[in-house]
Image (cartoon, rainbow, N blue to C red):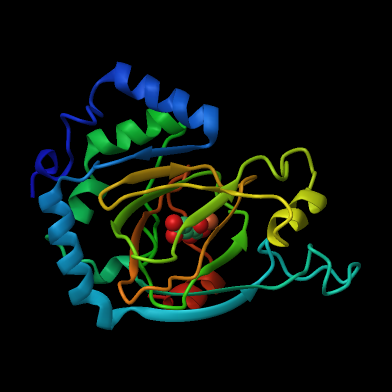
């Protein structure tokens, strides 16, 4: 499939250096860049059907984790925000089950798309070296959610394929911690999670490409309350070649190693 028919290039001329500069500025300003209608409506229709066909192959996981995605620190009580358990449950179809002819694969490996990401993110991007991690189709069904957390990675690249009708919002607050400076931001992390500090909602419609810096931004996906599930694709890249996702993470998210 020709990648130039997958992306709405009139609206998002990603091959244009000037456009990339403005995207980079937006990402640097707010830690998030939402490119609405990045995918053409034909691509969205196709990917919704593809994702529904693949749904029986999804691996559903349920995890308790803290916001820091670290093992508990026993220097703090279990109810301390460092250790306080959050719940995540969703399904995932990993890379090896994405059909060869899928527009997701064509987009993922399109050199102009990778060049766009590199210029906006300011890093070189490489696919994962394992067979599961590069393209992931995530399903959040009724009652499912992603609990509050900070990402380990410095950036995330996602495509909204199907929005839920109720619930499923992406909530976030930027600069709550400063990992690089060694500041875990416990007071504000607690305030957001306990509802005393209001997060923002990042609106993303079907077909949107979202670039998000989640290392110091606390974020979550609110439980989906509609029958229509939220389907979101993560396009996962490394800043170094030949990196595999850890075995522990692969078992947790995909239920297998290869
Ligand atoms: O589903 C989303 O929109 C975000 C997912 C996310 O935060 C993550 O995978 O770390
Ligand atoms: Fe995240």
Q: Is residue 135 visible?
A: no
Comparing 203 with 84, the one in front is: 203
On screen, residue 40 versus residue 180, left or right, reads left
Comparing 94 with 226, the one in front is: 226
Q: Residue furthest top?
A: 18
Q: Quadrant of residue 18?
A: top left
What residue is drawn where x is 9% and y is 42%? 5
- Identify whether 238 is placed above or below 221: above
On screen, residue 169 versus residue 40, left or right, reads right
On screen, residue 11 versus residue 122, left or right, reads left
Instruction: Where is residue 28? Give x, y as percent.
Output: 52, 28
Comparing 24 with 101, the one in front is: 24
Q: Which quadrant is home to the C terminus?
A: bottom left
Q: Is residue 180 visible?
A: yes
Instruction: Where is residue 197? Give x, y as percent.
Output: 71, 50
Q: Residue furthest right?
A: 75
What residue is drawn where x is 83% and y is 75%? 78
On screen, residue 242 versus residue 159, left or right, reads right
What residue is drawn where x is 52% and y is 72%? 247
What residue is drawn where x is 47% and y is 75%? 144
């Amino acid at each position: 499939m020709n990648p130039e028919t997958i992306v709405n290039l009139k609206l998002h001329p990603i091959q244009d250096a000037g456009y990339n500069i403005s995207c980079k500025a937006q990402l640097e300003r707010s830690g998030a860049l939402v490119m609405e209608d990045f995918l053409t409506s034909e691509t969205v229709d196709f990917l919704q059907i593809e994702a529904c066909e693949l749904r029986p192959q999804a691996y559903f996981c349920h995890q308790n984790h803290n916001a820091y995605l670290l093992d508990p620190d026993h220097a703090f009580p279990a109810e301390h925000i460092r250790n306080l358990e959050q719940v995540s449950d969703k399904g995932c179809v990993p890379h090896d089950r994405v059909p060869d002819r899928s527009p997701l694969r064509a987009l993922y490996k399109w050199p102009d798309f990778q060049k766009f990401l590199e210029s906006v993110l300011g890093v070189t991007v490489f696919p994962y070296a394992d067979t599961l991690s590069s393209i992931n189709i995530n399903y959040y069904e009724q009652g499912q959610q992603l609990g509050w957390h900070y990402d380990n990675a410095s950036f995330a690249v996602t495509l909204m394929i199907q929005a839920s009708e109720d619930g499923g919002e992406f909530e976030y607050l930027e600069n709550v911690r400063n990992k690089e400076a060694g500041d875990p931001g416990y007071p504000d992390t607690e305030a957001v999670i306990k509802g005393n500090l209001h997060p923002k909602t990042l609106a993303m419609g079907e077909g949107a490409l979202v670039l998000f810096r989640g290392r110091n931004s606390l974020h979550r996906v609110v439980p989906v309350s509609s029958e229509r599930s939220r389907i979101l694709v993560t396009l996962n890249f490394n800043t170094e070649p030949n990196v595999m996702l850890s075995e522990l993470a692969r078992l947790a998210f995909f239920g297998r190693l290869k």
